[in-house]
Image: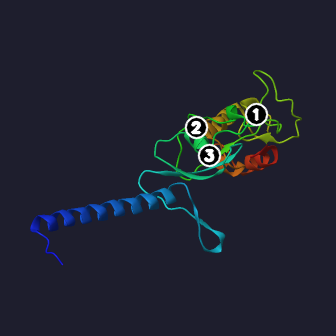
Amino acid sequence: MAELSRAQLLVYGAVGVALLLIGARAIRAEEDAGSFAQARSGGGGAVQIESGGGDLVVDVTGAVRRPGVYRLPGGSRVLDAVQRAGGAAGDAALEGINRAAMLTDGQQVVVPERGAGNVASGEGGGTGASASAPIGLGTATVAELEAIDGIGPVTAQKIIEFRDSHGGLGSVEQLDEVSGIGPATMESLRSRLQP
């Protein structure tokens, strides 16, 4: 076997170190990509999501092409989450959400569907839905909210602002965070609103 010169050993050593660094980077990139848009199922049916850095994890559901849990960079908007979920489906009522709202970690973005009796039909008029039919939480107007027992114009406006600032609402229970809504009002909301 021929002996290697010092220069050859240095070249082979440098190539070996470079390959190790490239391999380590590839493995790390693969791990990051795998945890970026996936939730891994843990024991007992619970969903565990790895978080890191300034990323946000959001649940996008409703009238989108690929509903699911997604990781987005900090500072992302509702529109970014909808696009990440494959974009709006053909029956989406995008006017029912604030697409410019900033996302928060753990937020659920619900894109409402058209034709479910919950999309306002034009300006200055009602939806045409009966007074007993539930109102869509993602599209309720100030006038529709005021029609609910215990909701006045100020509280109705607070609800709309809360919904818009959170990029939509996934459940009526989230309205408990709005100031001015007590237990009796929550009962009225539960009976008159649908997610």
Dot 2 falls on a residue whose secondary structure is helix
Name the kind of residue labelled 3 in the image.
Answer: Ala
Q: Which residue is outermost to the bottom?
A: 1
Q: Residue 62: x and y, percent?
A: 71, 46
Q: Residue 42: x and y, percent?
A: 59, 70
Foreground mark, 2 or 1?
Answer: 2
Classify 10 Å Cα crowding around label 2: few (below 14), some (14-19), many (20 and above).
many
Q: How many marks?
A: 3
Q: How are the residues colored?
A: rainbow
Q: Which residue is outermost to the left?
A: 6
Cα–Cα span, label 2 and label 1: 28 Å
Q: Are marks 2 and 1 in contact (CB under 8 Å)?
A: no
Classify 10 Å Cα crowding around label 3: few (below 14), some (14-19), many (20 and above).
many
Determine whether, in the image, residue 126 is placed left or right of residue 89: right
Q: Residue at x 11, y 64 (%)?
A: 7
* Residue at the disc numbered 1: 146
- Sequence-wise, the earlier of marks 3 and 2 is 2
Q: Which residue is outermost to the front?
A: 1
Quarter of image, res 43: bottom right
Foreground mark, 1 or 3?
Answer: 3
Name the kind of residue labelled 1 in the image.
Answer: Glu
Dot 3 falls on a residue whose secondary structure is loop
Q: Nearer the viewer, residue 54 or 160?
A: 54
- Sequence-wise, the earlier of marks 2 and 1 is 2
* Residue at the disc numbered 3: 85
Q: Residue at x 62, y 46 (%)?
A: 85
Q: Is residue 113 above or below residue 52?
A: above
Name the kind of residue labelled 2 in the image.
Answer: Leu
Q: Which numbered dot is residue 79? A: 2
Cα–Cα span, label 3 and label 2: 10 Å
Determine whether, in the image, residue 133 is placed left or right of residue 84: right
